[in-house]
Amino acid sequence: MSNLFRYHIAAGSYSVGKTRAVLMQAFLGTCVGVTIYDSDAGVGGLIHLLLPEPIFYESVSDPKKYASTGMPLFIQALMEAGASLKKLKACVAGGALLGPLNQQDLDLDIGGRTTEVVMNFLENSRIRCQKSETGGFFTCRLSLDMQNWQSRIEPSGYEKSFLNFDSHPPSTQHIKRTMNELQPIPQVALKILRIMEEDLFDIDKVAQEVQKDQVISAKTLKLCNSIFFKRLEKIDSIKNALILLGQNLLMKMILSASVKSFFNTDTMGYSLCRGGLYHHAVGTAIVAEKLAHFTGLVRPILAYTAGLLHDIGKVVLDQFITSTYPLFYRRLQDGEKNSLEVEKKILGIDHTEIGSQLARKWSFPDSLIETINHHHNPKNEIQHSELTAIVYLADLIMSRFHTNLEIERMDTTILTTQLEKIGLSTSQFPNIVDLIPSSVFESSLEPANGRGNF
């Protein structure tokens, strides 16, 4: 298996191909994955489903992400590639209930309903399901070896939990010393954060400051033309970026480019893939911005920034999670614990505490300090409760529906109250998930291209 090319299938997409040295894989939490193949024809594929069915069938823009509309498209692609319907065999995984389980999880049960739609489709199509591991409480990885057409379902993070590390939990003083030695994010980014809450400011002056920093300028332009923010016209200067993107989008690009190296740690603590912390941060930022637009309660640029920076404490703790990984992973998977409880027990401090201390040290605005401090446990009495609730919800959605980035376990017992705080209900949760842009899921390693035939 080590010689196989690993091809990641992003949520809301599928890939179909013929016999070759490729390992298709999908990381699943609440999402459901299905591998289907015809070994005689040497044709198979994997689909990564986000939701059971569209909220409104008349306005379906991306049918691949729903079980009811994605499965027929997937089967059609397999048949067009040469598979025989009578010889197809399937394997189904995912649909987990993640985090501390409560009645609310059972009522929502998006993964369970997606699984039900998939199983009914397979039965009606007379496609034999050889293996099914759905539900449960943990994330998993579904893979299809396209050399021998074997499907495997494994716990996500399985290999890492058995690596032979000597566990030496650090002292809180050691952690805080590491925080104090951490080099701040670039000055231009800090300047943007400090003027973020002002309604009027001179974006031209900000752009001029960026151009003085050749490194940040180059990183910003690279990000402007990246997979996160696809454009038809290439952006080749900061001035051009300001004209084409506008001030809010340019500020987002500058901030994202500024923190990329900050989040791209070389250690393997929280991340389940290369750049996992950064991809989770940008994904949470994009979802938070969408929620801000949807509710109209918070300025979208502020929601984006808060989502981008909500986990900065993990940058400080990442190296210490690496040194205690087997202990950390097993405690996280053992019982109904969330990430903060395990961090606190092993390290004596959690990433929200150390993150808010870091934000205060760097003179972040109060709105960001509060959001970083309370995004796992939003409290009614905090001043910026709506912003914190939006970031909590964005973080929860990312932890449930994009599980291959980093280790995270969110508490869902407060979901109803946080939705109500921003004028929403649990019945609208699938609608909220449906807001997630496909770019969020495509931004991880080796993303599939939607249809992905090769």
Image (cartoon, rainbow, N blue to C red):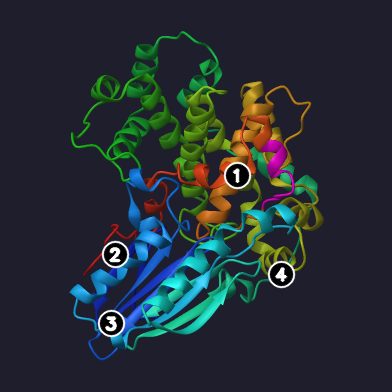
Q: Which residue is mark 2?
A: 73
Circle 1 residues within 10 Å: few <14, some 14–19, many ≥20: few
Query: What's the amino acid at mark 4?
Result: Arg
Q: Residue at x 73, y 68 (%)?
A: 327
Q: Residue at x 48, y 28 (%)?
A: 293
Circle 4 residues within 10 Å: few <14, some 14–19, many ≥20: few
Query: What's the amino acid at mark 3?
Result: Leu
Asked whether the beta carbons under mark 4 and mark 2 sit within 8 Å of each other, the answer is no
Query: What's the amino acid at mark 1?
Result: Ser
Report, in whole angstroms, how far the alpha carbon at label 2 lies from the one at label 1. Answer: 28 Å
Q: Which residue is mark 3?
A: 85
Report, in whole angstroms, how far the alpha carbon at label 4 lies from the one at label 2. Answer: 39 Å
Q: Which residues are magenta?
A: 410-418
On the image, the x and y values in percent for residue 353 come to 74, 39
When the figure is inspected, residue 391 is found, relative to residue 187, above or below; the finding is below
Dot 4 falls on a residue whose secondary structure is helix
When the figure is inspected, residue 176 is found, relative to residue 99, above or below; the finding is above
Q: Which residue is mark 4?
A: 330
